[in-house]
Structure formats: structure tokens, C-alpha cells
Image (cartoon, grey):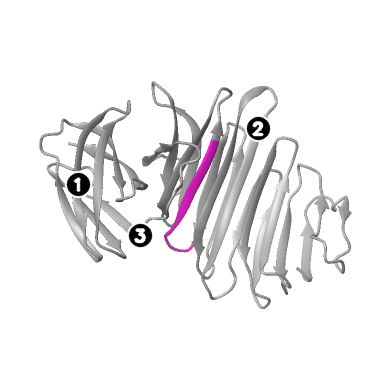
Amino acid sequence: MSGYSQTANDIQPLRLMDSSRPDPILFVIDSNTSFQLNTSNYTDSVISWNLSSNHMSMGVNREALPNEKDYATVNKNSITYGNPDNITKELSCYSIFHDDNKDKAFNILTSKLKMNFQDSIITTTHQNFTYSIQKVTGGATTYDLWIYADNGDSILQFIASQLPLDANTTHTIDPFYFNGTALQTVVYVDNGNNGTLEDTLFIASVPLGQTIVNSVVKNIFIYPNPVEDFVFIKSTSDVNMKMDITLSDLQGRKVFNSSFYQDKGIQSKSIDLRTIASGTYILTLYDDKGSVVHTQKIRKQ
């Protein structure tokens, strides 16, 4: 960036690189302070804010045009982003965290996070090995999720697409949830940002090195939830294709599987769950390439 303005609370930054240089501007600050950034006049095609300490690195990035601007507040473990422009922007947010005293670490990337005019989010890396995205203002959005989780003896990969993030909602991503038999990534959903968890999204693991093909199926809505007899799947696809659906219990045991044909365009399909016992399950949709396109927890009454 070729132009910027900055203010610091509590103390001044210890070091600031010359803003006339083409290098990225670097602040070294006390861990207890915070500062605000208003960035604009971009000369390159990417805006990148990155924050690092001994055990953590995190950032917010996006493609940027010269006449655009962005707002941020940064402290020791969080980056707040605000969009002051009357255009839609697409963010990539990441967090890398490890602890020398604990034999585990994670690398989390949330991408394709759309931010409309006056939308704002808070991204936070927590000491308990979780990462959260809080939608503060603006409407609902979606994002893709990609995780590498190192539990000391193995590295697991978790991938999900088009996760819905509602307005005034926090998603807390936990790559080390133990489901009784193995580690699992879950996303805790706090609707209303009131500290109460209304839902838990279970993210399927995939083998490392598997080629992930972006699915042409999108805008997936599964309702009602809870479900009594039939669950409906409303989705949009760019092509005609076969879809597979599985239902697993919280121990990972498959209790139901079926398939249906997704027509090009928007359609709604009903799935008969009358023979399924009452309880909480994980519903997973796969495209015709075997890639997971949607995972959601549902409750059968």
C-alpha cells in the first residue's frame, strides 16, 4: 500500500517502517495494546494484514483495487475487519497456532468470506486451540473452511464449503473435538452473540493429499430441523448430477444412506427419515466426485 493512517492506543508502536518505501509496513507493539488501521491507495492487487507472536500467526487478506479502502483494529490475538466501500469484498482469514508445551497445532483457513457494505467481523485466535469468526454487523454470508490439525502423532485434514454465517453470529472452530473414538473438527454456532450455543456443525475429515474439486452444487438449505418424518434439501447446481446423502450418529456410525439426482438449477428434494430413531445425527452430502459439499447436524424427533 502506498498510503495509510494509523493511531495507537495506550502506547506508540516501538518501530514503524518508512511508509514511503514499497516494503510492507511493520509495527512491533506491546502485547497489551491495540491499534486501528485505515488503509487505502493500494498499488498492488492484494491487501494483507498479518499478526504474529511466539506461538501464533493470523491474518486477513483480499484482492484490492487502488480506489478501495479497508478498516481494521488489531490487538495481540485478534483482527477486526470493516468494509466502508459500497461494494462486496471477499476475504481470506487464517490462523496458525502451536504451543511448545503441548504436542498439537493447527492451520485454519477460511476463504470466500463475502463482506458487503458496512459489514464487519472479528477474527480471534484463542489459547484453547480454537479460532472464531464473529459477524458483528451486516447480513448473512458464507465461507469455505480448510484445516490441518496436528495432534502429535498424525495430521488430519478437514474441508467444508459454503458454511452459512448468519448476521450477529459467532462461529468458533475447534479442530480437536473428541467424538469418543477420534478427533473431529466442529464449528460451534452462537446465534445472537449471547454466549449460548444454538448449533454444532461437524466437519468431515479427508485423507491428506486427496484432490479436492470445487463442487458445482451450492446454496444448500436443509430443513426442517428438528425433523419428524421428511427432511428437505434445497440446492442449486450448475449441471445435472447424482448426489449421495449419509446420516451418521455422533460416534461416526452410518445409520442411513441414499441418493438422488440433482437437476441443473434450483430444486428441492425430500428424504424419508421415518424409519430413523429419535436422536442427533450428522447429515453429509457428497457430489458425484465423492467430495463433501455440505455437512450439518440435525435432530430427529
SS for tag 1?
strand
- Closer to the chain start, of discs 2 and 3, is 2
Which percent across, then down, holds residue 212?
A: 44, 48
| Residue topped by disc 2 | 98
Up-down relation of residue 141 to residue 170 (above or below): below
Which percent across, then down, holds residue 103?
A: 62, 23
Q: State which quarter of the image contains the N terminus.
A: bottom right
SS for tag 2?
strand
What residue range appears in magenta? 137-148
Q: Is residue 138 magenta?
A: yes
| Residue topped by disc 3 | 216
Amino acid residing under circle 1: Ser
Q: Residue at x 48, y 63 (%)?
A: 138
Is 123 positioned to the left or the right of 29 in the image? Answer: left
Query: Of 148 and 226, which appears nearest the observer?
Result: 148
Q: Residues within 10 Å of mark 1 (few under 14, many from 20)?
A: some
Amino acid residing under circle 2: His
> Viewer-nearest of labels 2 and 3?
3
Q: Residue at x 50, y 45 (%)?
A: 146
Amino acid residing under circle 3: Val
Up-down relation of residue 95 to residue 174 (above or below): below
For the residues labelled 2 and 3, the Cα–Cα distance comes to: 35 Å
Which percent across, then down, holds residue 209?
A: 50, 40
Residue 259, disc:
1
Is 23 positioned to the left or the right of 97 in the image? Answer: right
Q: Residues within 10 Å of mark 3 (few under 14, many from 20)?
A: some
Which percent across, then down, holds residue 234?
A: 24, 57
